[in-house]
Amino acid sequence: MKFNPVVHFEIYVENMERAKAFYQAVFDVKLEHMPSPTPEVEMEMWFFPMDKENGMSYYGAGGSLVKMSGFTPGGGGTLVYFGCEDCAVQAERAVANGGSIQQAKMSIGEHGFCAVVRDSEGNLIGLHSMT
């Protein structure tokens, strides 16, 4: 395989307005509403910025916040990392917007820095930066 196989991620939420406000504030982006892909599946989806012509995120894998019966937020199993200029900035924004810092910014040697925060819904997310 000559490319990154990750093409999409979903972050499950209970309170979409609260979760949207959290992610928009922490990453300084505007999420875009996406109708349910099939009429028989009732869900609410809000996508992170994407290039609509190519169906790709600006960089990295595409993803969305999803509110759907049977899928609940929480930590465990999978950890999605978001790229940042300085992960300490987004970690502090997480706290200011109803989240908490699970692991403060730390060096990962030649690979830069990372932090782990809990979002407004209880999900763990990673933050990565080179500075």
Image (cartoon, grey):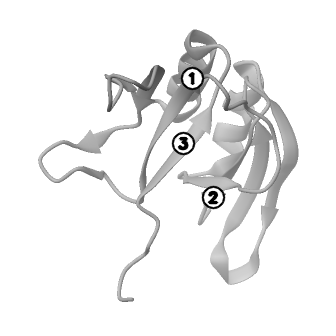
- Looking at the rendered image, the quarter that the C terminus falls into is bottom right
Residue 128, placed above or below residue 62: below
- Whether residue 49 sits left or right of residue 69 in the image: it is left
Q: Secondary structure at mark 3?
A: strand
Residue 61, placed above or below residue 102: below
In the rendered image, the residue lying farthest to the front is 40
Question: What is the distance, in whole Å, between disc 3 and disc 1 at their CAs?
Answer: 10 Å
- Looking at the rendered image, the quarter that the N terminus falls into is bottom left
Which of pointers 1 and 2 lies earlier in the amino acid sequence?
1
- Disc 2 marks a residue whose amino acid type is His
Residue at numbered disc 2: 128
Residue 20, placed above or below residue 11: above
- Foreground mark, 1 or 2, reads 1
Q: Secondary structure at mark 2?
A: strand
Q: Residue at x 70, y 64 (%)?
A: 113
- Foreground mark, 2 or 3, reads 3
Residue at numbered disc 3: 10
Q: Please state which of residues 127 and 130 is positioned toward the viewer in this rendering.
A: 127
**Number of marks present in the image shown:** 3
- Whether residue 27 sits left or right of residue 96 in the image: it is left
Residue 93 coordinates in the image, percent (x, y): 67, 29
Q: Residue at x 69, y 19 (%)?
A: 97
Which of the 4 image quadrants contains residue 72? top right
Category of crowding for the residue at label 2, using alpha-carbon neighbours closer than 10 angstroms: few (below 14), some (14–19), many (at least 20): many
Residue 130 coordinates in the image, percent (x, y): 59, 66
CB within 8 Å, label 1 to label 2:
no
Which of pointers 2 and 3 lies earlier in the amino acid sequence?
3
Category of crowding for the residue at label 1, using alpha-carbon neighbours closer than 10 angstroms: few (below 14), some (14–19), many (at least 20): many
Residue 67's disc number: 1
Category of crowding for the residue at label 3, using alpha-carbon neighbours closer than 10 angstroms: few (below 14), some (14–19), many (at least 20): some
Residue 8, placed above or below residue 120: below
